[in-house]
Amino acid sequence: MSAAWTQTAATLAARVRGREFSAEESIRAHLDRVAATDPRVRAFLRVREERALSEARAVDARVAAGESLPLAGVPVAIKDVLHLAGEPTTCGSRILERYVAPYTASAVARLQQAGAVVVGKTNMDEFAMGSSNENSAYFPTANPWDLARVPGGSSGGSAAAVAASQAPLSLGSDTGGSIRQPAALCGIVGLKPTYGRVSRYGLVAFASSLDQIGPFARTVEDAALCAQALFGRDERDSTSAAQPVPDFAASLGSGARGLRIGVPEAFIASGLDPAVETLFRAALDDLKREGAEIVPVELPHAPHAIATYYLVATAEASSNLARYDGVRYGLRVEAEDLKRQYGETRDRGFGAEVKRRIILGTFVLSSGYYDAYYKRAQQVRTLIRRDFERAFERCDAIATPTTPTPAFRFGEKTDDPLQMYLADVFTVPANLAGLPGISLPCGLAGGLPAGLQFVGRPFDEATLFRLGAAYQRATNHHEARPPLD
């Protein structure tokens, strides 16, 4: 079973169900892989070796009892913004380093019900605020393709774990691109579902109207398999949508023929690395050869998405993070009075980027500025959503590069927050509009992965999977592996 870590989630689950090998053997092989590679990659904050092996043995018992488990024995890594009962949830922050979750997030529980086994919690930018994983309070995670470069963020640990073959599946959260951007920089598949597709119960909030949980995988088939288990209504989350979940596997073989792909040329015209643009154009040519039609579309308000996002998201963050006061849970710094306790706790517990966003969000919500900033940002958000609605009258999905550049070096953008924020320029619009988006590897630019993004209509992940599967059948970019070995 030493080669179990090279297999897809679909293959692993099928072989465990077929009793070719056990879930315990699958998990043990991946734990060995983590032990061999994570000292260099540092994707994990915590590895739960004994608990994972115990849970794998329970999966073997369920298989022996005749249960049909779609993710039987599949290792999954979980971003440390999702709760797992009885275990720490730090959100990559000092302010929560002693916090232990009292319950398990619905998304995690659904994967466990399907037979998956959580092997550990992954590193992340603090409170999911960042595009490089350099904002973790503990240590930076490295990109498996080049250990001197960032894996992207904020779900960088989850992306790096899949890219390094430490787990075939992982979960991240995407508020402005935090699944798709690191997926692109690490050369794997990352799905941000439609807002409301996946329960947020047990997800620590950053910006509640934007956050969404989704999977990382090496193949579209694996991402679809994970989504099948994740999606669906949850009564514990009032924003969870009561939408039927189609059989995604049925759409994977339909091909790209007859689908119209919109390309917003004006939006992607500036700031794009030439090598990334070359790979993006080649991907469009590949899709045309598969029978897709490429059509021009316009997203006139998309250039304003970054500014809009950093008003809406920071406003919601300043509200959500007010609960970390040193009284109820997490870090407490004793002081001579309550007001100073609040201040000292937050000063020591929060990092620089989190403080920056809390201050900005508090400002835009303050008296005299609400209408000028937050209200206008919400109005622009509506215009962005309407742009997508008009574009989808002409096409079935919209294609852009996922990121404007390949992975950058550690420290390259930390002194310029605006340049860091622009790493999400192509991903943020889908969050503001609540739309599904998927990133696929589309080749190497100077030896580093680049990503192709598809954005779909609300609750139409099936078309994204269909297009992605067609593209992966026509190319072999998803088969490339980083030079860790």
Image (spheres, helix red, strand yellow):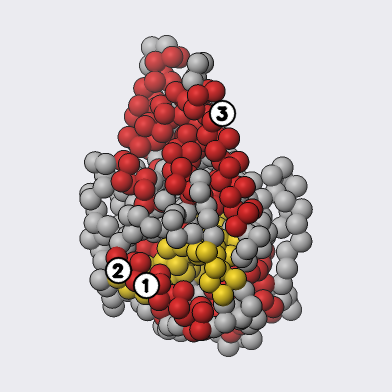
Label 3: state its secondary structure: helix
* Label 3, label 2: how far apart the Cα atoms are: 39 Å
Q: Is residue 247 left or right of residue 422?
A: right
Q: Quadrant of residue 198?
A: bottom right
Residue 375, which numbered label? 3
Drawn side of residue 230 relative to residue 67, left or right: left
Nearest to N terminus: mark 1 or mark 3: 1
Residue at the extreme top: 337
In this view of the protein, can residue 189 be seen by the observer?
Answer: yes
Q: Relative to 102, is 474 above or below?
A: below
| Closest to the observer, 479 or 203 | 479
Give me the residue at 42% from left, 28% from top.
360
In the displayed structure image, the side of residue 376 where residue 271 appears, left or right = left
The reply to whether residue 91 is visible in this rendering is no
Asked if the residue under mark 1 is in contact with the one under mark 2, i.e. CB atoms within 8 Å, the reply is yes
Given the image, on which type of amino acid does mark 2 rest? Answer: Ala
Q: Secondary structure at mark 2?
A: helix
Which labelled disc corresponds to residue 275?
Answer: 2
Q: Is residue 452 left or right of residue 135?
A: right
Task: Please say if the residues under marks 3 and 2 sit with CB atoms less than 8 Å apart.
Answer: no
| Quarter of the figure that contains the C terminus | bottom left
Above or below residue 259? Residue 367 is above
Residues at badges 1 and 3 in contact (C-beta under 8 Å)? no
Q: Residue 356: where, in percent of width, then height?
A: 37, 32
Mark 2 crowdedness (10 Å alpha carbons): few <14, some 14-19, many ≥20: some
Residue 279's disc is 1
Graded by Cα atoms within 10 Å as few (under 14), some (14 to 19) or many (20 or more), the crowding at tag 3 reads some
- Residue 450 drawn at (x, y percent): 37, 67
Seen at 35% across and 67% down, the residue is 277
Name the residue type under label 1: Leu
Q: Is residue 181 above or below residue 325?
A: below
